[in-house]
Image (spheres, helix red, strand yellow):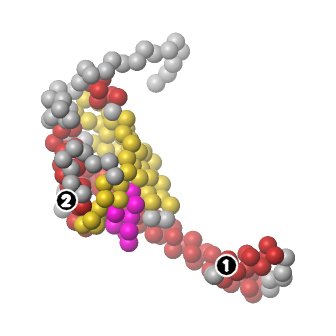
Amino acid sequence: MSKFHGAANRLRAGSKVTAAQQDGADRFGEQEVDQMSEKENQNKRTVRRLYEEAGNEGRLEVLDEIAWPDHVEHNPFPGQTQGVEGLKQRISMVRAALDPRFTIEHLVAEGDLVAVMWSNQCAHVGEWFGFPPTGKSFIARGVDIHLLRNGRLAEHWDVVDISEFLMAVGAASAPARAAGAHR
C-alpha cells in the first residue's frame, strides 16, 4: 500500500495522522499525479503523430517508431492484417481512397488510454469499400480509442460516421431538416 493510500485509509478510519505523515502523503500524491500527467501527455503526443505524420503526411515509417509490431486492430478493414503492417495498410487504404486531412477536435488521455474525436476533410479519389471514385468532397467524423503500452500504440477501437460519404456517393439521401433546425 502506498503512503498516500495508507494515510487516506487512516483518515477514513478516524485515526490521527501527524502533520509529517500528511505532508509525506501529499508529496507522494503530487509526484504520482505529475508522473501520470507526463505519461498521459506523452501518450497524447504519440497519438497526435499518428494522425498528423502518418495520416495527413503519409509518413508510414513513423509507425515503426510509435506502434508495437503486434498492434491489435479491433475493427479491421476488409483485407487488413494485424500488427504494425496492418496499421500501415489501413492508413494507406484511407490515403489512397480519400485524400484525408485529419483535424483533431478533442484529445483526452487517462493512463494508457487516449480518446480522439476527429474530423476528416476528404475527397473521394479512389475506390472505397466498393464505391468507385467520385471526386466529391465530404467530411467524415469519428472517435478512436487507442491503448498504449510503454508509450507506443498497442490497440485501437473506432466508431466512424460515414453518413456524409454515403450521401456524397449517392448511396443515401440527405435527411430532411426539421423546421428551425440549425447545423
Residue 95: quadrant of the picture = top left
Q: Main secondary structure of the magenta part?
A: strand
* Point 17% across, 32% down: residue: 130
Task: State which quarter of the image contains the N terminus.
Answer: bottom right
In the foreground, 92 or 38? 92
Q: What segment is highlighted magenta in the picture?
A: 146-154
**Residue 163 on the magenta span:** no
> Which residue does the numbered mark 1 point to in the structure image?
4
Residue depth check, mark 2 versus mark 1: number of the one nearer the observer: 2
Q: CA distance from mark 2 to mark 1?
A: 43 Å
The percent coordinates of residue 148 (x first, y second) are 38, 64
Whether residue 27 is visible: no
Mark 2 vs 1, N-terminal side: 1
The percent coordinates of residue 26 (x first, y second) are 68, 77
Tell me if 138 is positioned left or right of 80 in this view. right
Tell me if 54 is positioned left or right of 28 in this view. left
Tell me if 168 is positioned left or right of 159 in this view. left
Tell me if 61 is positioned left or right of 113 in this view. left
Q: Does the CB distance between marks 2 and 1 fall below 8 Å?
A: no
Q: Which mark is residue 168?
A: none
Q: Amino acid at mark 2?
A: Glu
Q: How many C-alpha atoms fall within 10 Å of the one at disc 2: few (<14), some, or many (≥20)? A: some
Residue 48: quadrant of the picture = bottom left
Vertical arrangement, residue 149 with respect to residue 140, above or below: below
The percent coordinates of residue 20 (x first, y second) are 75, 87
**Residue 151 on the magenta span:** yes
> Which residue does the numbered mark 2 point to in the structure image?
85
Residue 6: quadrant of the picture = bottom right
